[in-house]
Amino acid sequence: MLNNRNGFMLHWVGLFLIWLFLPVNAVKAQDSGLPVLVHFESGATPPPSYLPLNIKQIKVQDWQVETAPEHWRSIRLPFYTEYPRPKIHLKGRFLYKNSAHDSRLILYSGGIHGFAEIKINGSLIAQQNFNYLPFEIAINKDALTEGVNEIEIHLRAPEKLEEGFPVLPKIYAEQRVFGLLRPLFFYPQSTASLSGLKVRLQNFAGSKAEIAYRYRFDLPAEVKAKAKLIKAEEWFLNENNKVVFHSIKFIPAGRNFRENTFSLDTSYVWSVQRPVRLKLKIVLSTDRSALLSQTYRIAARTVQYRNNALHLNGQRLTIRGVNYHQNIGSYRNKGYYDMVKADFSALKEAGFNAVRFPHYLPDPSSVGIADSLGLLLFCEIPVWQYPAALLSEPAVQKQMKNILLNFERYYGLSPAVTAFSLGQELPLHKSRILRRFIVLHSLAKENISVPTYLSPIPDRELPLREASDFYIYDAYHPILTESKFFLQHKLFNLIGKLGVLYSPAFLNAAEEANSDMRMRMLRSEVGLLNEIPNLQGGFIQSFNDWKPVRSSLITKITDSGAIMPDGLFTYGHRAKYRINELRDIWKTKDSIITKEKRMRSNFFSIAVFFASIVFFLMYRRRRRLSDNIKRSLRHPYGFYIDLRERRTIPVYDSFILGIFISFILAITVSSIVYYYHFTGTFQEICAVLFVNSRIYETVLSVCNTPYQLVIVFFIPILIFPFALSLILKTVSLFTHTSIRIRQFLAISYWSGSPLLFMIPLALIAYHWLVYLDMKIYLLVFVAVFIIWINWRLIYSIRIFFHGKSFTILLVLLLSYTVPFLILGAVFKPFPYWFNYLIFLAEMHSLY
């Protein structure tokens, strides 16, 4: 096994040589040259639900962009780029008219894709992290001039944790884009302002529903000094602008809030079937003058988690949902919000009632579309598969806390928002991480009006309830392959990924994703889900085909690049199935067992068979070869003494043995790699180690071709003894030991002679993995051979150098770290890569 482990080192060297000659210049040009800016249209943009309908928006005009060494040029918004280096410098102009009724100007954004430094008239006013959260920035009048003003935005990718949540290069991670994609405008804030509006459905009483509302207001000091009472007047209007409730209240000027409760007909309560929304007009005035008049679009509903289930307006929910990826590139040459509305309408027509935004927060304008259609939204903090070391970083915890404290402000008036995720696929089995989320959950209870959820690693020790209100079961394989123990556990309420494409071994995604097999797979998943009473439903993966951060064995190459073909709709938002077919998915009562598609291959067995015939023919014809093999196995001490004393052991025999055992070892290792390379865990490991996408794709391509895989392992294993010979020869110069290089070659090859006993194992290795449910035994047998030949190698080197076995062992162990040194120096993996590799071992059950 010496040849295997050290051959692995040369395997890394070989990949480094591949990297040198791969045509990656195009990629480097994209990373370091001019970014490609892609424009699309916004379409009809719904106003953010938390802002008044009668707010005065000040648009930014004449946008220009500069990307060094480019000069300023005009640009249309919205736009995005996948390669934000160098920094994108944007500027635009807006018109400001000073008014005595306005206290300051507010910059609103639905969220900026990237880390942004924002300047007004050359003065830095804010630095905004990349976290998808909408934000407002207050600008004092002193920073503004009467007339034309200028806004500058320096946009780039986050470079440290304080600048945004990191995205690890996972195979299921969506392609991250940078740019101004969401609404951005200014609006004036009057000297009398209103904030913190909340509307709650408290309870039902027959045909009546009790509605509670509350808001805060801030008045100028001179108003408070002159007026004793503030007149607060509210009108609730239906869609036809008919008043359904009117209230007048005189409030002491020293009080800064207003709250009230009233009864309303239940026909005005928002629900999935009847997404009724009202208008709330609020007027504050004194006996002398009006202070403010603002109109909001609101809805009355309540979402609760009680009795181990989600409830909407007191009724237990059944979730028929879908995962809706950002998929920004698919909106090219389309109206963004028009397409979002068309997507949501198609889902509603197909019988879906819920949308999950995986690992991101939607902008309030998209949420407004769901409000009008009656869809239930599940929003998520972009904290996904973070190892414990990353979750423990103060910068990450600070950003999570910031989102928790501001979520209700921007999404609290949206009735569609049903639940909020504190994180997905996290190591909650670690006590220190669990404690942090218990604290976050307590903070969420105080600041967020909807239930919270988490998705733990399912086969680990399941966490306590205190970490969130409920849990979603997330895994990258069909739930048919999972034990019902986890699905029936009361901790889980929803399935996060139904019908996920996880391996060509189950479904050949590239050719059959649109076939009847795909629909049969979805029905099987939903059928099993419907058989488990504890579950309230789940989310199909996904709404449409989407672009991952890199290609993998389950992606499909199209004109738009590598896409994940697991959508109910195409990348261009065209339906793959008829509406009736989609409706029928949720009506399935019985699960249909779909057999796993085995990836058969006889290449490894045939190669071992013919190689063994050739070797044993030579074994019989060369008596000295057979004698030396027997002697090296029976009397290793005497055999190594002969090598040390330069007694005749033909170099030819050493090479014959070395070639054959290298081949046997390469076949065995290749069988294991070929079998496991279909798994998500293996592809994730490669994604971590090979950040460069060209190298990553080359590695997966080699792993997917048996003969290339054998060659990749065979050549380094065979030539490794030459490298070892040079190392030992260098050591011998300092120890004044007179030993030739061919002796080092001989001990390297003859130490591996026990690998001859691995011929039967190599012959059946792949079939063992495919057809027998005893994979661990094969790995144990291989580990035994590793220990055996390494012990023989240490033994032989000790005889040559008269050294201590422990010292030799340390030298060998040190040599095994060379691949990791090469990895760090050449491939430059992302920060926390080692922590993430350990985390992958812990969460292997997800794949």
Image: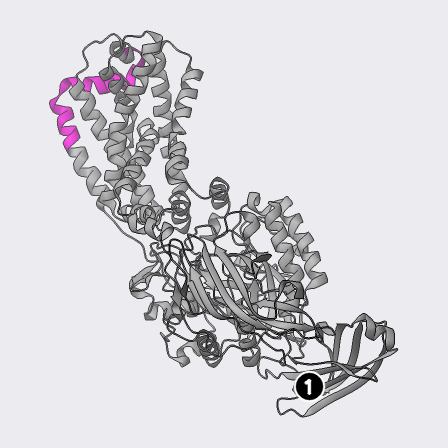
Residue 377 on the magenta segment: no
Residue 58 place in picture, x, y as percent: 57, 74
In the rendered image, the vertical position of residue 558 relative to residue 684, given as above or below: below
Which is nearer the eye, 677 or 293? 293
Residue 489 place in picture, x, y as percent: 59, 58
Q: In the image, which residues are magenta?
A: 614-638
The answer to whether 47 appears left or right of 141 in the picture is left
> Amino acid under label 1?
Thr
Residue 206 place in picture, x, y as percent: 73, 86
Per the image, label 1 sits on a secondary structure element best described as helix
Question: Would you name the residue on which mark 1 appears?
Answer: 266
Which is nearer the eye, 28 or 637? 28
The answer, for residue 208, to whether it is visible in the render is: no
Residue 627 place in picture, x, y as percent: 19, 17
Which of the 4 image quarters holds residue 124? bottom right
Colouring mode (rainbow / by chain / secondary structure / one colour) = one colour
The answer, for residue 586, to whether it is visible in the render is: yes
The answer to whether 829 appears left or right of 184 in the picture is left
Q: What is the chief secondary structure element of the magenta stretch?
A: helix
Q: Single out the residue that lies furthest toward the right.
A: 228
